[in-house]
Amino acid sequence: MVNIPGRKVAVVGMGGAFPTCKDLSEFSSKLFANKSLIRTFDDAMAYEKQVRSTVAGFITEPEMDLEVIWDPMEGIYPETYIDKLNRIPDANLATSDVGSIWSMLAAQNAIKMAGWSTDLVQSERTGVVIGSGGSANTILRNGWHNFYVFGRKTRHSGGHTVDRTMTYREAANVSVLIKNKGVCETISSACATGLGNIGYAYRLIKYGLQDRAITGGVESTSLETFIGFDGMMVLSRGFSPEESSRPFDMARNGFVCSFGAGIVALEEYEQAVARGADILGVIDEYFNNSDGDGDMFYPSFAGQQRLWKGVMAGSNEKPDVVKVHGTSTPSGDAIELLSVIDALGEEGYHISAPKSQFGHMLGGAGAVEFITALLMLKEQKVLPCLNSPNLNPELETFQKNPDWKGPVKPLAAYRHLLPQESFSKPINSIVCLNYGFGGTNSALKLSRYDK
């Protein structure tokens, strides 16, 4: 690939599926009003004696104006869905799990906002790059239940089990719906998936392989996903739902497992300008790397140092806001905050932690949080870090290690960087951060469009 000089990438549309919100407008309003989208998870409460955590940011089918059609034999297998608003054709619903449906709806909204014509959408120069962090568990659980528990023939698990559960089902369903003729691909990298797909799509456009892309990440509501993390004992417990996600706070004890989708429309900058598109932001740089320390779970300060060096690409100009990963895990939050301080210093920017408002959307996290960055640019307001009144006034254990080469002040010294309520300020650039199991790290620098 040859870097084409001056080829930039604009964001021209966005859409998604968000807990407790009927659309993007309500999502934005609630976020800037400092609201939490987290609530008691009814599916988990049904197994209250078997789980530790009982809160999540989740979306039900009725909230998306969908109706589940259950299998006629046991009523436990979602054979297909009905779109009550007739947004998605029945043929496309038949090949979809609910996350794929969210992706298609969000893609429609992003394309409408972008103002792309049918010819542009269906061009060889338009790609689809969408991924999720896990399997279509609802389809798999009930499909295999028919086979293993009830001893039924394979046909009773449905004729679409494969296409409804394959790894790149969201990208495939969106591509089939919009009929693009460019790439159709998926990047799956745990909790860095959402930002990783957007970053990959950005590179496709930057290096001249595509002119536009529908891209993002999704994680559909799934009890299996929830109990997997609950079994790891990494989910928040002991707080009210709205206080459960508390990045950087001393009392944090785990993240809130949540679900949602974020899809954006990217376009080569000059083409977007030429057709008079409403440009939501400009992607300046994307960088990703691996920790390389052989640890599946523990965050790497050195890996994040290299990440910052890559995304800043030699620039000394500080972003106005850093949108952090900020999961509310004890070690992850501390390492991340100190890596931000190491890269940018102690003044001149603010830190936003959207997971404090809607939890950790796993494969959808980076994409939905990228949308929050676009909303911050639009509104010229910083989203808060809720539930973080008390930061550790003592040094972290790892800071006392003689080999530690990072900041030597406790987290409480940086209290002023973490607003607990939304507030207005001039915002020209934002850096978005997301990390995932296996030591994968992603960072993206986004700037306000200057006409």
Image (cartoon, helix red, strand yellow):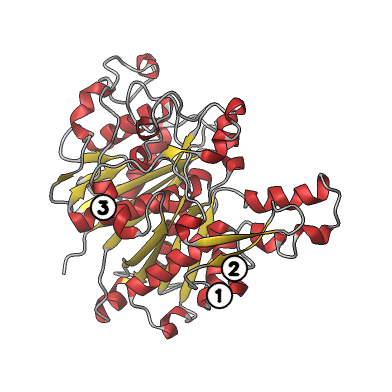
Question: Is 304 placed left or right of 25 in the picture?
Answer: right
Quadrant hosting residue 268: bottom left
Q: Where residue 432 appears, x then y in whole percent?
A: 33, 48
The label on residue 444 is none
Q: Which residue is mark 3?
A: 29
Q: Quadrant of the C terminus?
A: bottom left
The label on residue 89 is 1
Q: Where residue 412 appears, x then y in whole percent?
A: 24, 22
Q: Where residue 60 appears, x then y in whole percent?
A: 50, 51
Q: Residue at the spot x=30%, y=30% of the render?
A: 387
Q: Residue at the spot x=64%, y=66% of the render?
A: 95
Given residues 361 and 216, the one toward you in this image is 361
Q: Where residue 198 appears, x then y in whole percent?
A: 42, 58
Quadrant hosting residue 391: top left
Q: Residue at the spot x=32%, y=53% of the render?
A: 27
Question: Is 122 placed left or right of 305 in the picture?
Answer: right
Can residue 379 be seen here?
A: yes
Q: Which residue is mark 2?
A: 93
